[in-house]
Image (cartoon, rainbow, N blue to C red):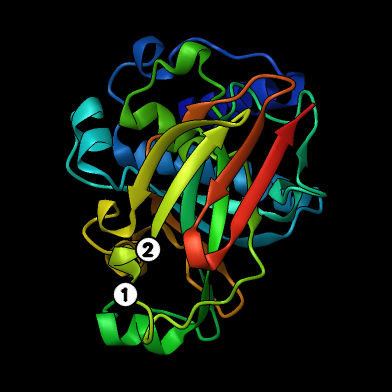
Amino acid sequence: MSRNKEIAEILYKAEANNKPIEQISKIYDGLTIDDAYEIQLINIDRKVTEGKIITGKKIGLTSKAMQESLGVDIPDFGILCDSMEVKDNVVKKGQILQPRVEGELAFILKEDLKDGATIDDIYQATEYVVPALEIVGSRIKDWKVTILDTISDNASSGMYLLSDTKINPLKTDLKEVELKLYKNGEFINSGKGSAVLGDPVNAVLWLANGLSKYGVALNAGDVILSGALSAAIPALPGDKFLVDYGPLGILEVCFE
């Protein structure tokens, strides 16, 4: 078994057994970003073989603060599957390791996007945008991650929840979309679309032009989680979150 397959197996078991592991990048010297994406995609291929359906992609590390905390200047991406969709606004106990909640904007594609895409291509390919919640999670103990760890771990993907409110990105300035996040009724933080690489559409542009290297594509029907508008907030059993997008409505999720 190759080293990357070995690491993929360790991560797969951590998720299956609901038990976090030690920091991969400390145990395995010399890992590269290309290695990390190979590890990620080994496990995605395995999930597809098991019957999971790919529903889209997520973009992480889209804020300056997050990039600086990991010592990088680029985002990363992960793959979304149907098993990650939150049902009935409830995350059940044990579904995600070390969950954290963040508010985002999700792009729903009506056309494929290929390498060489422009901003205009992103708008053309987008059917609509919706408010979304991402519940990130980490299979790495205590969230002690480098960019190599989080990419290997499917960009710390967990679950996601989409609003029914459809936004026309040509008629709404996504940079100006604002949210307020509440936990158990207490205001925690706020954010704005401009926190996502200056504009969420820039994140989707980065993704469209960076996937082909890894044999991944953006396809019609894909959900694209474009990045957090504010800091991710840890969730414990019994916690209830409400994210208020103002005129675009609210999203709620609770943890069993």
- Is 35 located above or below residue 256 in the figure? below
Circle 2 residue: 177
| In front of the other: 20 or 229 | 229
Quadrant of the rendering where the C terminus is positioned: top right
| Residue 1 visible (yes or no) | no
Numbered tag placed on residue 84 in the rendering: none
The picture places residue 191, in percent across and down from the top left corner, at 35, 47
Q: Are marks 2 and 1 in contact (CB under 8 Å)?
A: yes
Query: What crowding class fits label 1: few (fewer than 14 Cα within 10 Å), some (14-19), or many (20 or more)?
Result: some
Picture coordinates of residue 111 (x, y %)?
A: 51, 86
Residue at 65% x, 53% y is: 161
- Residue 159 vs residue 179: left or right? right
Please state, as top left, top right, bottom left or bottom right, where the N terminus lies in the image.
top right
Amino acid residing under circle 2: Val
| Distance between the alpha carbons at the discs numbered 2 and 1 | 7 Å
Tag 1: amino acid? Asp
